[in-house]
Amino acid sequence: MRYPEELLMDVYWSFNEDQYPKQDEFNAAFLEYSEALDNEVEDINAICFEHPKLVIVYDSFEDDFEDEDMDGDDFESNTVLLEAGNGKSFTTAELLYKIHQAIGVLLEDEDAHFFEGLNFITDEDEDYPGLPIYYLNLGS
């Protein structure tokens, strides 16, 4: 199956924002954040991914990381499975909200906590057969 190579590349967000128990609260914060950066998203309820599930891969530093230890072994690769609420597709707001809910707390104190889009990796992973896997780009 063919999946988009990139998702949400023109969307800005910071994972050090608060946790939002409801989608509507997140949407309001997301719109405010985007507006403050002069990067208003045209329609946050537009479908951005027409499949019911996807896996996000992201890197984080291990807990005992020290600046002097930058030998490349200090990163930990993590995955999270996301499912569309309607069982069919994700809107821009829903996908970003689900990413934020799943990993925002884990990234809020990281130096690289800014959302910079998703890049398709594969749909042939043995741990997630047939599911598209996307890499979460993070910036500081």
Image (cartoon, helix red, strand yellow):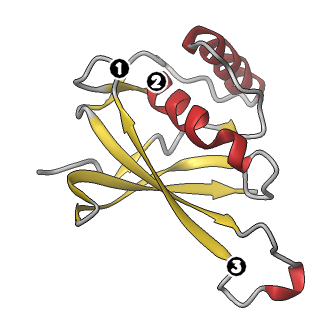
> Residue 41 falls in which quadrant of the image?
top right
Mark 1 vs mark 2, foreground winner is: 1
Residue 85 badge: 1
As drawn, is 72 to the left or to the right of 57?
A: right
Amino acid type, mark 2? Glu
* Foreground residue among 6 and 86: 86
> Residue 51 falls in which quadrant of the image?
top left
Residue 34 in picture, x, y percent from top left:
68, 26
- Cα separation, mark 3 vs mark 1, equals 35 Å
Residue 76 in picture, x, y percent from top left:
60, 70
As drawn, is 122 to the left or to the right of 96?
A: left
Amino acid type, mark 1? Gly
Q: Are marks 1 and 2 in contact (CB under 8 Å)?
A: yes
Q: Are marks 3 and 1 in contact (CB under 8 Å)?
A: no
**Residue 83 to residue 107: above or below:** above
Mark 3 nearby-residue class (10 Å; few <14, some 14–19, many ≥20): some
Residue 7 in picture, x, y percent from top left:
40, 44
As helix, strand or loop, the secondary structure at mark 2 comes to: helix
Q: Which residue is mark 3?
A: 74
As helix, strand or loop, the secondary structure at mark 3 comes to: loop
Sequence-wise, which precedes: disc 3 or disc 1? 3
Sequence-wise, which precedes: disc 3 or disc 2? 3
Amino acid type, mark 3? Asp
Q: Which residue is mark 2?
A: 94
As drawn, is 23 to the left or to the right of 126?
A: right
**Residue 74 to residue 90: above or below:** below
Q: How many marks?
A: 3
- Residue at 52% x, 32% y is 96
